[in-house]
Amino acid sequence: MADFVKIEHLSKNFGDFEALKDIDLTVKEGEKLVIIGPSGSGKSTLIRCMNYLEEPTSGTVTIEGEVLSRKNRRELAKKYSAMVFQQFNLYPHLTVLENLILAPMKLQHVSRKDAVAEAMKCLKRVGLEEKAYMYPNQLSGGQQQRVAIARALCTRQKLILFDEPTSALDPEMVQEVLNVMIELAKDNITMVVVTHEMGFARQVADRVIFLHRGQIIEEGTPEHFFTNPENDRTKEFLSKIIH
């Protein structure tokens, strides 16, 4: 597999706080990369730097050979990546369908007819085609997050970034969202997922990285990571969340 995302010497400061420290990371095309670690370790900051929602303090992010910058981030975001957030980020005054067709029409200049056809196909894929003309507040949290995933799919991007997509959900709704993501992982989409769902990481990830205090301190296959981690901090973290 070819390199799709390449991060080199990436650092991000918020005032005096170093959220990320000299990160080097490569994501292969089609790879499913899962990022885990304790709260405050820099996971969300790292994934947000991948599409320049956060501008790095130093270092570079390259996607398919193109270096992201403040000037070109909108263009490259349209071209390569979509993001699924913790809090869904759906427009409450728009129907589900209108939420889905907005970006393809406005940013990618897709015709309304084609955008609607693609949106309905994506809604069917996440099991929500019958909800197309409802508003977000008429849906459960799990359904809203599945709509957010369908919205990401509508842009037909090669890279989808998931920032703790189940963290805002009630426990009984988590699995319905994970099931959709598990199905997506069978495609050749490149997925980078920040999550605390270890079962999902075991099942789907090609590679897992562990962040601690803004640095990658361990990475490997799920088998390595969950059965034979090397770093003491990784072992401590896993001992607390896996019983």
Image (spheres, helix red, strand yellow):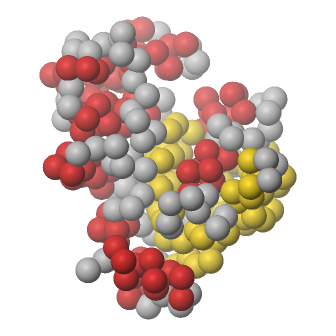
Image location of residue 201, percent across then percent down: 37, 66
Which residue is nearer to you in this view: 103 or 213? 213
In the image, residue 36 sits, relative to residue 185, either above or below, namely below
Which residue lies at the image location 29% right of the left edge and 68% below the top edge? 199
Please state if 155 lies on the left or on the right of 71 as rendered. Answer: left
Residue 93 visible in the current orientation: yes
Q: Quadrant of the C terminus?
A: bottom left
Task: Give the number of callouts.
Answer: 0
Q: Is residue 201 above or below residue 16?
A: below
The residue at the point 61 percent across, 29 percent down is 78
Name of the residue lying farthest toward the front? 16
In the rendered view, tell whether residue 179 sits above or below residue 38: above
Q: Please, is residue 116 above or below residue 210 in the view? A: above
Q: Tell me where residue 139 sits by quadrant.
A: top left
- Can residue 176 be seen in the rendering of this structure? no
Q: Residue 219, percent across and down?
A: 56, 77
Q: Is residue 21 left or right of residue 180?
A: right
Toward the right, the furthest residue is 58
For residue 24, what is the image quadrant? Answer: bottom right
Q: Residue at x 42, y 66 (%)?
A: 205
Please report the residue visible at 36 percent of the width from the left and 10 percent of the height from the top: 93
Return the residue nearer the eye: 140 or 79.
140
Q: Position of residue 80 (x, y in %)?
A: 60, 38
Q: Residue 26 location in percent, x, y?
A: 66, 63
* Direction from residue 35 to residue 203 in the image, left or right: left
When asked about the image quadrant of residue 66, the answer is top right
Which quarter of the figure is the N terminus placed in? Answer: bottom right
